[in-house]
Amino acid sequence: MSLGHTIALAAAPILAVAKISSGVIVAKSAALGALAAGAIAIIRNRREFGRLAQMNAAQLRDIGLTPADIYDAGRLPLTQDPTLALARLVDERRPRDRHSSTSGE
């Protein structure tokens, strides 16, 4: 048996552990990356919400919101996006297209 073959046999268990560890490391890195992306999104959305919260009642009315809407959205848990909640609220309030009705006109 050559020296190279002996070294390869001795190193095989170490390499196997390294492969398992690298797989775990990759999985944990992906999870941390997703967590970081989520945290960045939360920060960005809360910053945008802060801009909305600085608007006066007339400005809010122009975009279909009220100060009470801002107050309610600000009370949402940190895990929920207040800007998404406000966008849904505006969408619900928006009048639907008259041409899509089935009135037979």
Image (spheres, rainbow, N blue to C red):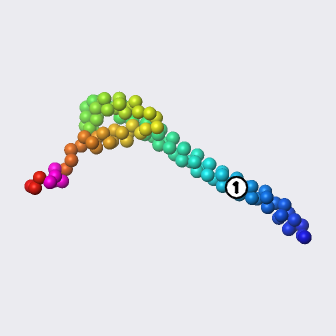
Which quadrant would the C terminus be assigned to in this image? Answer: bottom left
Given residues 52 and 104, the one toward you in this image is 104
Lateral position of residue 96 relative to residue 68, left or right: left
Lateral position of residue 38 relative to residue 17, left or right: left
Q: Which residue is depicted at the point 33% across and 42% down?
A: 87
Q: Which residue is mark 1?
A: 20
**Depicted 74 relative to depicted 9: above or below:** above
In percent of width and height, residue 14 lies at: 78, 57
In percent of width and height, residue 27 lies at: 61, 52
Lateral position of residue 21 relative to residue 13, left or right: left
Name the residue at the left extreme.
105
**Depicted 44 relative to depicted 18: above or below:** above
Q: Is residue 50 visible?
A: no
Q: Which residue is depicted at the point 35% across and 30% down?
A: 72
Q: Which residue is depicted at the point 36% across and 39% down?
A: 85
**Depicted 62 relative to depicted 99: above or below:** above
Q: Can you tell which quarter of the image residue 20 is in?
A: bottom right
In percent of width and height, residue 40 lies at: 50, 42
Residue type indicated by callout 1: Ile
Given residues 59 and 39, the one toward you in this image is 39
Q: Is residue 91 visible?
A: yes
Q: Can you tell which quarter of the image residue 11 is in?
A: bottom right
Which quadrant would the N terminus be assigned to in this image? Answer: bottom right
Q: Is residue 19 magenta?
A: no
In percent of width and height, residue 58 lies at: 25, 31
The total number of labels drawn is 1
Q: Which residue is depicted at the point 28% across and 40% down?
A: 90
Main structural element of the magenta stretch: helix, strand or loop?
helix
* SS class, disc 1: helix
Badge 1 crowding class, 10 Å Cα cut-off, few under 14, some 14 to 19, many 20 or more, is few
Q: Please state the extent of the stretch shown in magenta in the rendering.
A: 98-102
